[in-house]
Amino acid sequence: MKAADRLLSFLGVDRERRTPPPRYRAIADGLLVTSTHTETVLEIDTATTDMLSAEDVLEHIESVARTAGAALQGAQCHLRVLWGRITGDSYIDEMMEDGPYHVGDWQRWVTDRADSIDALAMPSRYVLLHITQAARRDEAVQAVKDTATDAFGLTTYGLTERELAYRLGEAQRMARRLATDKFAARLAPAELIAWEVGRESKREIAGSPDRSGVIAGAPLAALTTGRVVPMTDHLRFYGADGTITAYGKVLPVLEFPEELPVPGAEWLRAVSSVKVLEEVDEADDGEPIFDEVDAGIEASVRFTIMPTRAARHDVSEARKSAKEQRISASKSAAGDPGEDILDAEASMSGLESSLKRSQGVRLVRMHPRFVVSAGSPEELNAKVDSLLTFYDEMGITVGDGADDQKDLWLESLPGDHVRVNDLVHITDAELLFGSLFWGGSAVGPDEGPIQHWLTGSTPGFTRFDVTRSSRERDATTVALFGLSGRGKSLAGLLMMLDQTFMGAYGTILDFKGDMTGVVNVCEEYGLPHSRTVIDENASGSLDLFGALADRDSAKEAVARQLQLLAPPNYGDIAEDATLAATTAVADTMETPSTWAAIQWLLDQDNHHDERWMRLGRALSNLAGTTLGRPVAGPRDSALGLPTDPGLWLVQMPGLTLPGMEKGQRDWDQTERLSMALMRSVITTTVAITGAQAMRSMPKTIMIPEVHNLLRVSDGASFLDTTARIGSANRTHLILDSQDVVGVASHEGLVEQLNTVYVFHLQSRAQQHAAAEVLQLPETAATYGAIGALARSSRKGVIRKGHCIMRDNTGQAAQVQWQPPTAHVLDLLDTTAPENRTGTEQPDPDEPAQDTPDTTEEAA
């Protein structure tokens, strides 16, 4: 060290504090190049850990610690937790340019959705990991090129093509070493890095990164042309016009408690849980209404996982120091070294032994900081107070960073280095990785239409496209489970509308007759649609002889329908008699029908059995009823469903489906007729959508009350077969049921589920089955989460649309369905108007119902 350095250090001015801010030279995918060094920049996807059991979370943490600990050992790393925001404008740009919509007034649908996105003002978390590759040689700094490199399409000022390729290869190798199924690390897009760099000095920069793949052609220097003035206890950010755009503060962590439970004290993941009171509305009397909103606290942690040899040396020195203090104290007049010294010596001795035995113990040197930003000094102080209080309750002491704001802020910049060396923690790597900085809530694909938003520990919007599964040759069945009035139908109808905007074919089977509102939405947005009513005027329209092209399959299906309609006292002969009748008409008639099979039974000359004739008379009587005529009456018409893309609503008024507690032998006449009608319309619809002429068209069928279909003899086999061939003929099923137990008992069908949504369920048996289909741990915490889904902050009000989503990758998180507008919600509401006072669509500003008390019994 030079004499000047020694003198300045003696005066409290360290060399690290005197170095200039980073000078950025180039940005490419996964790379940030400064005038002194190159950094690999990785984006860490959010892992879905909110719904995991404590044991699974611990295994998750240990797995990442092993992988990352080995890959990052000795490297200088910079972890950043940043918050952006998805805006309505960015969603409009995305959907207008590359979106899947092209039918009807889809631009209005997108704009309405964008307005709801802005109203929710949902933050979006970004976790970036900077890893210093190496110091750059002066020769490389001098070898400046002003032209863009075609290979990357990005500005490479200050880099030769050869060095850029080498550095990119290093970044890719690091990404491969770190990436696991529990830690999704990938090269950060160049535009995300540019956003990260630019926002630090220009707080007026857009709230979220441009994901277009380029840096909008802006010179790199323009990203940092802002002005920041550090004050004693805060920072002031100035815009181009000289006005203050934001206030900020960087707060160091001074002290951690001796022990933090892992899992249970995820101190970095929990940064998203810091809230602050904010005025959200105004009452009728003019008084402001306050609510808790996200404080938007960010984190900057520079750390180095110490090599084993260096860790042993530091621990040995600490043990020796503690030992010397103990010996010195024992020779003093008091003769008592004190518990702190004894504990320190014992701890260092045990840690040294563990390191020598190579038991996987790793030490980390880290510098954790929290970064707070606000639009006014008052807002800044409120956020700081909330932050200090929140972490004080965790036993973590956060300092105010007074007199160090300049150095702490520079230290937090990408491409900089540790400047405030004295605020350091040397600890077990478990403290860093136990913070679960990559954990939270994440579910669903990362592209497609926005349908709902996360309500877990990491907020954000989620996406879903029901027709995407067939394009990826995946299972094509979606299941919606939950009690009536909890939002299942709303979710299904929103999925159906979205796929109609995409030009798909969709049929909604409305057994209750309460989904007419979807037709009104179609009219509002110019979507092709129709409403078909199956009643006594549609005699024979659901005759399976007319629906199924294969005559052998048809005669067996019609026989099963007649067996379902047969009175219980004919159970011993129904199978033989009905199959004989359907076979006879199928073999002898050019146009066989169910009505003809019943007439065959009525003619005793055909079979010479009086009971068969009486069965025919009973079936004939049923075929003349309102519900029986479409299934078994004379064929006067065929089901007039269109075969063009659009949304086609099929309603069957007057159905009385049997309750889940009744066995098939206990069904009355109306229930048997209702079940036969239900099965006929489903079979007919599937036959239409499975026709060769429609094979290439994406198709979706929404089937409510599907548990009833599973209770008839061939129902499960029928649905299983339909689900299995869905990917091949691009047919998607949306199944709605209150009985998870009944559906979960059919393994073949469960195996075909692509995505599952579970709404509120009350009984422990149903909650247990729901946990099974969600692939969540079957614990009191999971049951409590399912039982609390309808809970609202308003007494006596049911929260509609809140559910747990499990996607096709097995990830599960709590989400809230959100229609684009309140008007659309009102149109789609299937609750009778006089009964709507007990339900609500939650206020976007209402605190999320995240984590229920794990000791609470499900309601």
Image (tube, grey):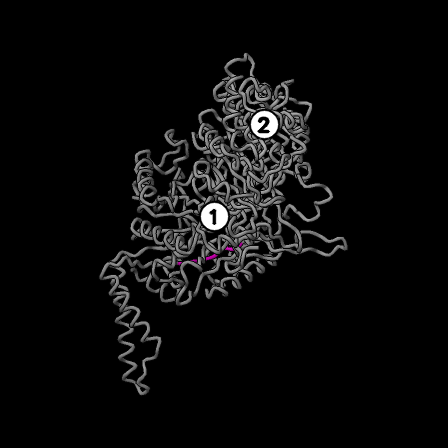
Residue 771's mark? 1
Residue 441 percent across, percent down from the top left: 48, 48
Counting the numbered discs, the total is: 2
Provide the residue span drawn in magenta: 367-372
Q: Is residue 321 magenta?
A: no
Q: Badges 1 and 2: C-beta atoms under 8 Å apart?
A: no
Structural crowding at the residue carrying mark 1, measured as other residues with C-alpha within 10 Å and reported as few (<14), some (14–19) or many (≥20): some
Residue 3's mark? none
- Residue 603 visible somewhere in the drawing: yes
Amino acid type shown at disc 1: Ala
Residue 322 percent across, percent down from the top left: 29, 73
- Helix, strand or loop for disc 2: helix
Q: Main secondary structure of the magenta part?
A: strand
Image-based side of 778 in relation to 5, left or right: right
Q: Which residue shows up at 56% across the image and 58% down it?
A: 383
Residue 813 percent across, percent down from the top left: 49, 46
Q: Is residue 371 magenta?
A: yes
Q: Which residue is mark 2?
A: 615
Residue 52 percent across, percent down from the top left: 44, 51
